Amino acid sequence: MRFATFQIDGSPSWGLIDGEEAVDLGATLRGRFPDLKSVIAADAIAAAAAAAPGAPRHPLSAITWLPVLPNPDKILCVGLNYEMHRKETGRAEVQNPTIFARFANSQIGHGADMVRPRVSQDLDFEGELAIIIGKAGRYISRAEAFDHVAGYACYNEGSVRDFQYHTHQFTPGKNFPGTGAFGPWMMTPDELGDLNGLRLQTRVNGQIVQDATLGQMIFDIPRIIEYCSAFTRLEPGDVIATGTPGGVGAKRTPPLWLKPGDTVEVEIDRLGTLRNGVCQEG
């Protein structure tokens, strides 16, 4: 199943994506579940889907996509999690995942423009797989990790590189408004199946700039969940962006920075394609 958050006639809602239609479950179930996060927290994905036959339907052309989870308790991001990316950055091998945080108000949905800020021209792309946590937990073992996953989505973890490199802390470059694209939808694990062989590809204006399989992650999903849940309690609706492959714009010669008018696509086999334009901050 594919679940999404969207606007209908300017009002936020959520629901199922069924082919070329959005099933507006928010219109039917809002009294019980005001948003997708509340559905995940109640472990009610299947119950919500059962309400689809009586819910309003809209063509996808009639909705405005919002971030899959606009209101996560936290967004954790894994840095340097593909060997090619680690090598292109010149970073040493490490024994534990590199983790930093992104704020929810930096996110945008599928079809919205990523925003190049007025204070920098160094806006970079980072195509990634995002995990959406379904069940709360602390000290989650590797063996139990997948039991805590509600679904997966595409993520473009856009980075303002000069601000990222001001110090050893990544936070400023990772949290500019309008730089974290998340969508179009969350796919449940039963539909996506085994992840390792799935291809992740990022394209800028149709040109392939990143190309890898999810099995090439240095730290796999169970290890990431185990590690993150050791230092923080993971909550339903939390998002973990699992890292980007090599080929980022900052490490190209010359650098390939995103500019107004560009189109960026992050595609993961079977999961879908996240597509965003780029605009200049006013």
Image (cartoon, grey):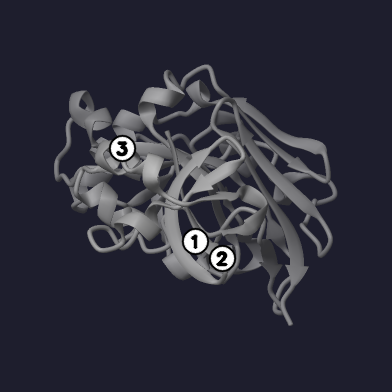
- Residue, disc 2: 173
Expressed as whole percent of the image width and height from the top left, the position of residue 102 reads 44, 61
Which quarter of the rendering shows the C terminus?
bottom right
Q: Horizontal placement of 227 versus 27: left or right?
A: left
In the figure, 93 relative to 169: above or below? above
Badge 1 local density, few (<14 within 10 Å), some, or many (20+)? many
Badge 2 local density, few (<14 within 10 Å), some, or many (20+)? many
Expressed as whole percent of the image width and height from the top left, the position of residue 113 reads 69, 63
Identified by mark 3, the residue type is: Ala
Chain-order first, disc 1 or disc 3: 3
- How much space separates mark 1 and mark 3, taking CA atoms? 42 Å
Q: Residue at x 31, y 37 (%)?
A: 50
Chain-order first, disc 3 or disc 2: 3
Identified by mark 1, the residue type is: Phe
For residue 50, which numbered disc appears in the image? 3
Expressed as whole percent of the image width and height from the top left, the position of residue 261 reads 84, 61
- Residue, disc 1: 170
Labels 1 and 2 touching (C-beta < 8 A)? yes
**Callout 3 secondary element:** loop
Numbered disc in front, either 1 or 3: 3
* 227 and 114: which is toward the camera: 114
Numbered disc in front, either 3 or 2: 3
